[in-house]
Image: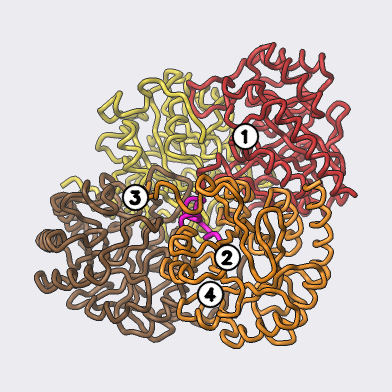
Chain colours: A yellow, B red, C orange, D brown
Amino acid sequence: MEEIRYKEKMLYSRELHPDDTIVQAGEVSIGRGGFAVIAGPCSVESESQIMGIAEAVKEAGADMLRGGAYKPRTSPYDFQGLEAEGIKLLLKAKQETGLPIVSEIMDAGNLDLFEDIDVLQIGARNMQNFALLKAVGQTDKPVLIKRGISATYQEFLTAAEYVLSEGNPNVILCERGIRTFETYTRSTMDIAAVPVLKRLSHLPVLADPSHACGRSELVGSLALAATAAGADGLMIEVHSDPKLALSDGRQSLTPQQFAELMKKIRALTGALNA
Amino acid sequence: MEEIRYKEKMLYSRELHPDDTIVQAGEVSIGRGGFAVIAGPCSVESESQIMGIAEAVKEAGADMLRGGAYKPRTSPYDFQGLEAEGIKLLLKAKQETGLPIVSEIMDAGNLDLFEDIDVLQIGARNMQNFALLKAVGQTDKPVLIKRGISATYQEFLTAAEYVLSEGNPNVILCERGIRTFETYTRSTMDIAAVPVLKRLSHLPVLADPSHACGRSELVGSLALAATAAGADGLMIEVHSDPKLALSDGRQSLTPQQFAELMKKIRALTGALNA
Amino acid sequence: MEEIRYKEKMLYSRELHPDDTIVQAGEVSIGRGGFAVIAGPCSVESESQIMGIAEAVKEAGADMLRGGAYKPRTSPYDFQGLEAEGIKLLLKAKQETGLPIVSEIMDAGNLDLFEDIDVLQIGARNMQNFALLKAVGQTDKPVLIKRGISATYQEFLTAAEYVLSEGNPNVILCERGIRTFETYTRSTMDIAAVPVLKRLSHLPVLADPSHACGRSELVGSLALAATAAGADGLMIEVHSDPKLALSDGRQSLTPQQFAELMKKIRALTGALNA
Amino acid sequence: MEEIRYKEKMLYSRELHPDDTIVQAGEVSIGRGGFAVIAGPCSVESESQIMGIAEAVKEAGADMLRGGAYKPRTSPYDFQGLEAEGIKLLLKAKQETGLPIVSEIMDAGNLDLFEDIDVLQIGARNMQNFALLKAVGQTDKPVLIKRGISATYQEFLTAAEYVLSEGNPNVILCERGIRTFETYTRSTMDIAAVPVLKRLSHLPVLADPSHACGRSELVGSLALAATAAGADGLMIEVHSDPKLALSDGRQSLTPQQFAELMKKIRALTGALNA
């Protein structure tokens, strides 16, 4: 219904830029044939927690570490994250493991704190927080944008355009499930988003099966599906003790489950590239 | 799926606060039996435009004037609003007509600019922009929160709780349509939201039929429906020349159409209160 | 996405047939300014039940009696209706009260049994049961079609076209709520369907607030909203003892609640027509 | 919202029946590690069309042939299928190629005509046509049920229960996409349905990527995704000349595209089973 204004060629569009974009996060390349796995807990909870998980996911073959320091929570009485202290712990984990860090930023006022964070994550709830998109567009940091839970492909791509049009070309798209009538799963992974976004855009496309389904027993199947559908990588929640997690424990894999999944993912990417 | 943490009694809840809350915007009371109509253009476009519309809606019986100075637009190449200049024009219209002003704030950094704006609007896309909700919660200004296009009642109310829990009790809820599979209308007005929110909460509940349907020919029917369903007021887009509007012209009433609708609304509220 | 084939002018369309169609069910006229209220239990359960409710809704001012003899239930182990015995009881209630009867038909093979039923109801689940639509289209009985829970306006109207194109012009449309992400209510009443269908088609449009919300405490507000939005009538579930109802008790009004609602509806239709 | 009645253990449930069910269609086994591919045109259009496609898909490795003789179409003026003549042509193709046949039945009155059809398909629109489900439940033929476009997992499984509870254990489930707000694709493939249904039920689970996306250029990616997610097989539309197809040409693969996809599917199933 709503008409939107386009430039003749949008910066995200594959017509303008036929080759796949590669976004560089530290030494990790995301896009064009590489396959990047980001793993870690929903929230940073303590030094021992994040250190333990960081070591474990690295050993299992993860390329990057995720962890939330600022958490967008439905209720103001939910755990809101360790905030600045959480960022410090993530940087310590980076130092120890060498894994580049992905963490969500919710407020442009915190950009200074994220200076050494490798990838700025824009959460689904902020996908159309245009003030925030413009602010991260004025940096040169990789920005991982999660699809809003009811965003169309067009809206997702034009949200990316807000970052690109400010001069920052380092945008990564991430499908994380949309809201439908089905309530058995937390969200509904829109698997078609992977090939559609790859066709419409040159930007790398990841998938987050953990948020998409909200149930650890389904994460593996969705991770393999997204890989087979052509995703450039995955973001997966891992927690050493999911039952005690301060957020999203229900959807977290244990490090051992994650390690087993990584083997299957490697077998699959091998077969697909053969 | 997602479990959320509640206080024993949420501040928004009717259990805690059985009487209807009245929010005062200048001399206009919103809630508990009053019926407040907010009208005006989607965007402030020029002095003559906003002045002309302000006079017209006042004459037709509107209680407050709306107008966007900062516009959240899907594409970065869409008209983004007159920004600070738009705020000035709104304040001029307030001076001329005496109508209190409702305008959307997208960035906590602009709070100073909104000092004389009577009601801060949080748009649907920012309903879970928690940094912004906390910031407006630290003021004492009336805050009108629009329901996110895929927000459940629970999420809508806990978004309000972010403002209330910071100490600002002046929250107004506004149903403006949700996203469904139906594409004939821009959104689908969830008319049940009106009685549901009135039951669960003591906060005033308005409806915005213009955004809900996106078609001027349907606005009247939805406005009457929301009134009959028990809404505490309406927000309606009016433009002197809808075809030339820089945004949302398709859903705007002309001043004359608005005046005719106001007569029907008065007849209806009369019958309902009789 | 799906292209569909149209006749130059569809039989349902207002372009072809500018005047409102009036469907005659016994002595009750549905459409064009009349306002018809159909009330009764979800299922016929026993002679005393249907007789008692029939008398009560007649006294409160209902124009027609509804009651299910064949029930489409999600599970095969749910109560499936009294079937042929239920039809007999409905006809007895018709004899006693003079109220025309509306009842759902699920199988064309039962058409003989429905010979004295005044209005054949096609349930939401069968809205695209084309074999059934064609079969009722070959009768001359009034056919009330409920909108499928995820049917677009276009699909709803082309379902009606199946009946019309077989030669039966007596079609009544009924909005009964669509499926969305919101789970607090059973369905989401799409109030805009009322004015949209009235614009696109000359057929009468009713609303069923009981199925739309699934909660008796909301039925009144939705009934008034649909009336204000321009519906040609309402279908409302009434049960003498909702807690003991074999189906849909949660959404049924008591006869007393129904009588009180009828007074408000009359006040509203009076004000709207004044 | 709606409470449904269950038997202590539903016949579809894995609790009752821990081992995977294998449904036998001619010599093809569906379920438990086998991987069955059903391919063919949306509609049977002519003898040369169905014969040509049947030979081509057989050569490419398809296990069964699909083709619609009775077509559920949104508009009564759309092509409704060749009906009885279409069934004859399907049986001729079966004779020539040896491929078992899957075809949709819309009316229990046609069961005789389907006597030599190997698998009765219940289309998405008829998923809750309980009269039809009961009728096919009284045969011993394999029944492939497509998920309704807005059916929950629970509703899908209880629809299967209607067939099982009549005594027919040969039920195959097929995910074919659900209706969401996204309109770029025809439906949204709910990839999580595959592992969820496999966990909740012992019945075989297929996926239909063609209807799920409605765009031939996406069919391959979704087919691979469903395979990786654990589906027991696929149903894919193939047409020798998609642009001339009388229905659903936009989503049909050419025989050559299908042959290439079959190679990838084999590589994938090989890697997954290794």
The kind of residue tagged 3 is: Cys
Q: Is C151 within the magenta?
A: yes
Q: Are marks 2 and 1 on the same chain?
A: no
The quarter of the picture where residue B112 lies is top right
Give the CA separation, mark 2 to mark 1. Answer: 29 Å
D109 and C238: which is toward the camera: D109
- The chain containing the residue under callout 2 comes to C
Disc nearest the viewer among 1 and 3: 1
Please name the residue that numbered disc 2 is placed on: C144
Please name the residue that numbered disc 3 is placed on: D213
The quarter of the picture where residue D166 lies is bottom left
The kind of residue tagged 1 is: Ser
Instruction: Determine whether the residue tagged by mark 2 lies in a helix, strand or loop.
Output: strand
What stretch of residues is rendered in magenta? C144-158
Looking at the image, do the residues carrying marks 1 and 3 touch, with CB atoms under 8 Å apart?
no
The kind of residue tagged 4 is: Ile
Marker count (numbered): 4
Residue B93 appears at what percent x and percent y? 77, 16
- The chain containing the residue under callout 4 comes to C
Instruction: Determine whether the residue tagged by mark 3 lies in a helix, strand or loop.
Output: helix
Relative height, residue C84 to residue C188 (above, below):
below
Give the CA separation, mark 3 to mark 4. Answer: 34 Å
C151 and D16: which is toward the camera: C151
Which residue does the image show at 15% across and 51% down from the upper left? D260
Please name the residue that numbered disc 1 is placed on: B216
Check disc 4: other Cα within 10 Å, few if <14, some if 14-19, many if 20+.
many
Please name the residue that numbered disc 4 is placed on: C105
Disc nearest the viewer among 2 and 1: 2
The kind of residue tagged 2 is: Leu
Give the CA separation, mark 3 to mark 2. Answer: 33 Å
Give the CA separation, mark 1 to mark 3. Answer: 33 Å
